[in-house]
Image: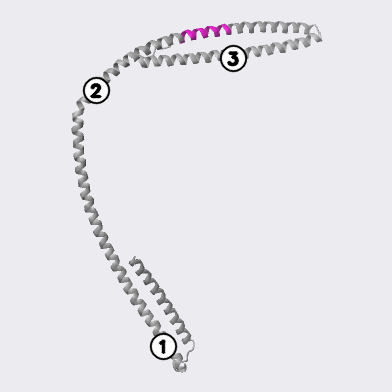
């Protein structure tokens, strides 16, 4: 706007004045370098040119300073005017804002009063509806609890029967495996005894057979041990899984009935 243009003009005039001062300084230095000559030693034309240059430089400096002062005054006046207008606008905006705020508060108060009155009128109806809904929910919850309790009792009994059957099956397999292991170990011991007997009689083929039987016995014993450990591990995992399932059933039933779960 006008303020920016004034500042730009001041800057340009300041630069111009500085350049003219520098030019005059160079001319004075050039003249001083001719000392001890005087203006009288110059030609008349040279003296006139030098005087004209100095006069022109002085005039430019005076004009630049005057223009700078005028521009500064104009800029300050413009800034004061803008500040005054801004203060006036701010005051008007503040007054309008206060009026709108008061109007908004009045509207909000009226709306709040209307809402409170409506809520007070509907409170009785809402309480009646809520009580009816609560009664119906309790009735349905009691019916659902009875159905769930019977269902969990049946699932509990079925799970216990399944656990008993699996335990019986695992025990039978374990007993069969133990009998098999005992038979294999007995055969291995007999073979080993035969091998030792043959070795005592100095028969080389019997020694080889004894070593073979001994190796077979060790392999059979290790295989039987691994199989036994696997069966026992599976049996333990099955028992843990079934116990976890039974505990879950007991906890679910206790949560539905409100009674503490019985110790398994």
In this rendering, position of residue 44 left or right of residue 63: right
The C terminus: image quadrant: top left
| Residue drawn at point x = 21 percent, y = 38 percent | 111
Q: Regarding mark 2 in the picture, which secondary structure is present there?
A: helix
| Front-most of residues 222 and 174 | 174
Q: Which picture quadrant has residue 110? A: top left
Residues tagged 2 and 1 counted as in contact (Cβ below 8 A): no
Marks 2/1: CA–CA distance = 110 Å
Location of mark 1 (residue): 51
Mark 3 → mark 2, Cα distance in angstroms: 64 Å
Q: Which of 83 and 161 is in front in this view?
A: 83
Which of discs 3 and 1 lies nearer the camera? The answer is: 1
Q: Earlier in the sequence, mark 3 or mark 2?
A: 2
Residue 171 magenta: yes
Residue 50, image x and y in percent?
43, 87
Instruction: Name the residue beneath numbered marker 3.
Output: 230
Point out which mark residue 129 bears.
Answer: 2
Mark 3 vs mark 1, CA separation in Å: 123 Å
Location of the N terminus (image quadrant):
bottom left
Which residues make up the magenta segment? 159-173
How far from the left and from the top, in percent, is residue 74? 30, 70
Task: Tell me if residue 38 can be seen.
Answer: no
Q: Give percent across and percent down for residue 243.
A: 47, 14
The residue lying at 20 percent from left, 34 percent from top is: 116
Answer with left or right where residue 88 lies relative to residue 14: left
Q: How crowded is mark 3: few (under 14 residues within 10 Å), some or many (20 or more)?
A: few
Residue at 37% x, 82% y: name it. Answer: 59
- Disc nearer the start of the sequence (2/1): 1
Q: Quick one: 190 or 153, which is closer to the camera?
A: 153
Q: In this view, does 41 lie above or below 128?
A: below
């Amino acid at each position: 706007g006008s303020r920016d243009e004034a500042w730009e003009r001041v800057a340009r005039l300041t630069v111009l004045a500085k350049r003219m001062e520098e030019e005059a300084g160079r001319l004075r230095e050039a003249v001083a370098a001719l000392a001890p000559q005087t203006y009288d030693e110059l030609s008349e034309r040279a003296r006139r040119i030098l005087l004209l240059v100095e006069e022109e430089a002085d005039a430019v400096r005076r004009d630049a300073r005057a223009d700078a002062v005028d521009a500064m005054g104009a800029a300050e006046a413009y800034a004061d005017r803008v500040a005054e207008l801004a203060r006036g606008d701010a005051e008007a905006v503040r007054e309008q804002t206060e009026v709108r705020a008061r109007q908004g508060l009045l509207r909000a108060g009226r709306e709040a009063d209307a809402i409170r009155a409506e809520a007070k009128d509907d409170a009785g109806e809402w309480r009646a509806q809520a009580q009816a809904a609560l009664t119906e929910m309790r009735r349905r919850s009691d019916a659902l609890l009875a159905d769930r309790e019977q269902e969990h009792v049946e699932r509990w009994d079925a799970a216990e029967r399944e656990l008993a059957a699996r335990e019986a099956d695992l025990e039978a397999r374990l007993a069969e495996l133990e009998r098999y292991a005992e038979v294999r170990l007995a055969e291995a011991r007999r073979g080993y005894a035969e091998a030792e007997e043959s070795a005592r009689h100095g028969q080389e083929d019997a020694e080889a057979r004894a070593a073979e039987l001994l190796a077979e016995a060790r392999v059979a014993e290790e295989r039987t041990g691994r199989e036994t450990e696997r069966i026992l591990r599976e049996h333990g995992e099955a028992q843990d899984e079934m116990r976890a399932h039974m505990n879950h059933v007991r906890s679910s039933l206790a949560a539905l009935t409100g009674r503490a779960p019985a110790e398994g």
